[in-house]
Amino acid sequence: MAKKYAMIHDNNLCIGCQACSIACRAENKIPNEVYRIQVWIQGPNQHADGSLNYDFHRQSCVHCENPPCVKVCPTKASYINQDGIVLIDKKKCVGCLYCVEACPYKARYVDPVTQAPDKCTFCYESRLSRGEQPACVTVCPTDALIFGDLNNPSDKISQVISRKITYQQKEHLGTRPKMFIVPNTQGGKIR
Amino acid sequence: MNQLWGSMDQYHQIAWHWEIAVYLFLAGLSAGAAISAVVVKKISHHSESNGLVKAGAVIAPIAIAAGLLLLIFDLTRPLNFWRLLVHYNFTSVMSVGVLALFIYFPLTLLLFAATFHEKFSSGMFACFKPIAGLAKSLGKVIDALVLLFGVIIGAYTGFLLSAMNSHSLLNTPVLPILFLASGLSSGICANIIVGMVWFHQDLNINEVASLDHTDKIIIYIELLLLFALFVGMFYQGQEAAATAAQALTHSAWAGVFWIGAVGVGLLLPLVLNFAFSSSFKSSPSKFIMFNATLVILGVLSLRFYILYAGQMFS
């Protein structure tokens, strides 16, 4: 059966240390001036009881089930593969950058070397094909990232998703992201 | 780079630059010139010897060819552009646009050949004589197709942008209609200017005046469409309303909109028309040409504004 790869980012466990970003750069040999992933630290937010907290936003591709980048690509260079991962076939890419503009998550950048758009692939072409977890997930010191196959009920991600409250970014656009976020509950604040 | 997570430059980059703004302008102008040339041909007595028809037949292919060249050079991988002609994706407005352009561009060349068929009877271009003859005999079919594909090209430039729900200034159903209307307006004005400069011996000044009058009606429609676009964004609430407020007040692009697109392009021609039209009766052609230039500059400003502000404010 086809896989349905997805990820959970737990805002209560994340500490914004950027280890995920550095691991990604090393594993995928990302050029200096661009990023597949950043963790934006937002805050401190002050609450009514005087407590403070930070929010952590994982800025990367959310691997939509209904991806706008794939819909607008004129040559089908952007595609969603059988395991639900959004990828780019650089050979077919003309560099019109329609996908870069159409992505509501600003997940894509233009690779300064190939001049084609690039983005997070869940390490599909490297680690995943060797049966390993994506680089960001492996290095996370607080286990704030969980990666797995939603079509497999015994996979850890399926169990966590059925237990914890999660949301997806910009759900109203109908993109159906496979990046699930556990909202921050610190400071009594629940989104 | 002040923040822990690194440079955020890539999130503020604009993917589509001036080449695309000029392309959107030229495609609209080409479509507008072709549509108005065919309409003038249908209602005028002198049909294709009419200077306005000749102007449209010259402008339509040149404008679209120049626009397409810009489009190719703006690709980050221009040597790969041929793949656009080989791979198609029917959910992509760009891909559908490539197909439409595939039909529209040759149609404008046929319109040119049919209009100037007697120029191909001898001389260095005589090798095109059979094509010109064929275009002439199929004149009515070509006219109908030019009309249809002119509307498709004019509207497609708007759909290209409105298909993206990542930017609320672009993601509105008004945009394709606004681009079609303003493209038609710029095409009419281009026909008037080129007609008066190059083909003035074939011009009937009454026809020019009535075309100019039609353009004024389109300007009123454009004002209504712009009003509907921004009011519609305010009604959408939160995100779109904030974007509309920013786009109308922030950065130099708000100036390009208010001064260039609305002021120079729409209001000034209307005001000048009210204030001076009777006193300029002695030289109406110069007055109409000046007005037409203002309108074209305004349409170009509108394309720049929508493209840049649309990408900047999401």
Image (tube, rainbow, N blue to C red):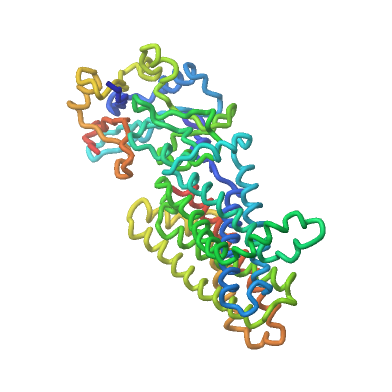
- Residue appearing at x 69%, y 73% in the figure: B49
Q: Is residue A129 above or below residue A7?
A: above
In the displayed image of the protein, which residue is found farthest to the right?
Answer: B123
Q: Is residue B264 visible?
A: no
Decide if residue B229 is on the left or right side of residue B122: left
Pick whichever, B149 or B9, lies toward us: B149
Image quadrant assignment for residue B150: bottom right
Q: Is residue B25 above or below residue B46?
A: above
Q: Is residue A15 above or below residue B49?
A: above
x and y, in percent, of residue B152 in the image = 49, 57
Q: Is residue A186 visible?
A: yes
Q: Quadrant of the C terminus of chain A?
A: top left
Q: Is residue B187 above or below residue B69?
A: below
- Residue appearing at x 55%, y 29% in the figure: A111
- Residue appearing at x 46%, y 49% in the figure: B313
Pick whichever, A33 or A55, lies toward us: A33
x and y, in percent, of residue A75 in the image = 49, 37
- Residue appearing at x 69%, y 71% in the figure: B195
x and y, in percent, of residue A163 in the image = 17, 26
Q: Quadrant of the N terminus of chain A?
A: top left
In the displayed image of the protein, which residue is found farthest to the left?
Answer: A163
x and y, in percent, of residue B29 in the image = 59, 61
Q: How many marks?
A: 0
Decide if residue A78 is on the left or right side of residue B213: left
